[in-house]
Amino acid sequence: MAETEKKYQRYVFAVSDATGRTCETVVQAALRQFTATDVILERAPQVATQQQVQEIFQRAAKVNGVIVYTMVSPELRQLANELSRLYAVPVVDILGPVLTRLADLLEMSPMAQPGLMHQLSDDYYHRITALNFALKHDDGCGADSLREAEIVLVGLSRTCKTPISIYLSYAAGWWPTCRSFPAAPCRRRSKRSINDASSA
């Protein structure tokens, strides 16, 4: 039984000159279209040299695997095509055709700089700061700095204020805060809280 399972094992190598998350996600999405598969997905990130590429092809050749890659370097993509023929290893270039078409459309050459997709930026740090603010002011905490909030969510307990505030802070960069009140005095206290925030 073990020999049968080993016989039908398949290997897919997600190769990238950056984190490899984009390549891995694409492969996983494609694998969802197949049932009862026994596929071993190996991610190879930060591949930046010809030696690294060759070692991956040698590994894939030994297990009859397939290589899917997202490499922005034209030299490494060309090398991958050459090694594919040399080692008889099937390859799928995810970024290459997209970069070629966009270069034709935009009439310019791509920068060929790895990792730009997940590069940290001012917008990223702003969203993280907003997320920290939302967590510190959850459920009425930090009332002394309520005036710093860009939006205040007011409602009964267990009405999904916290998930909404986390989404708004990370996705939109807003600085939300949550306020919870008992059912009976909700209208009176929420009105007072809004007036307090407006006069602060």
Image (cartoon, grey):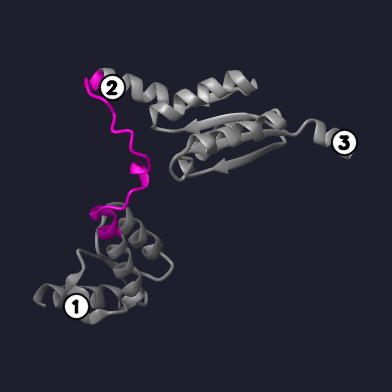
Nearer the N terminus, badge 3 or badge 1?
Answer: 3
Mark 3 near mark 1, Cβ–Cβ under 8 Å?
no
Position in image of residue 180 (x %, y %): 34, 74
Q: Mark 2, mark 1: which one is toward the viewer?
A: 2
Q: Which is in the foreground here, disc 3 or disc 1?
A: 3
Nearest to N terminus: mark 2 or mark 3: 3
Hey, what amino acid is under mark 3? Glu
Residue that numbered label 3 is attached to: 3
- Residue at which label 1 appears: 192
Q: Which mark is residue 103?
A: 2
Query: Which residue corresponds to the image point at 40% horizontal and 61% vertical from the top-left?
Result: 163
Residue 61 found in image quarter: top right
Question: Residue 125 magenta-drawn?
Answer: yes
Q: Residue furthest bottom?
A: 144
Q: Residue at x 27, y 52 (%)?
A: 121
Mark 2–mark 3 Cα distance, whole angstroms, equals: 48 Å
Magenta residues, start to end? 105-127
Residue at coordinates 28% horizontally, 65% vertically from top-left? 129
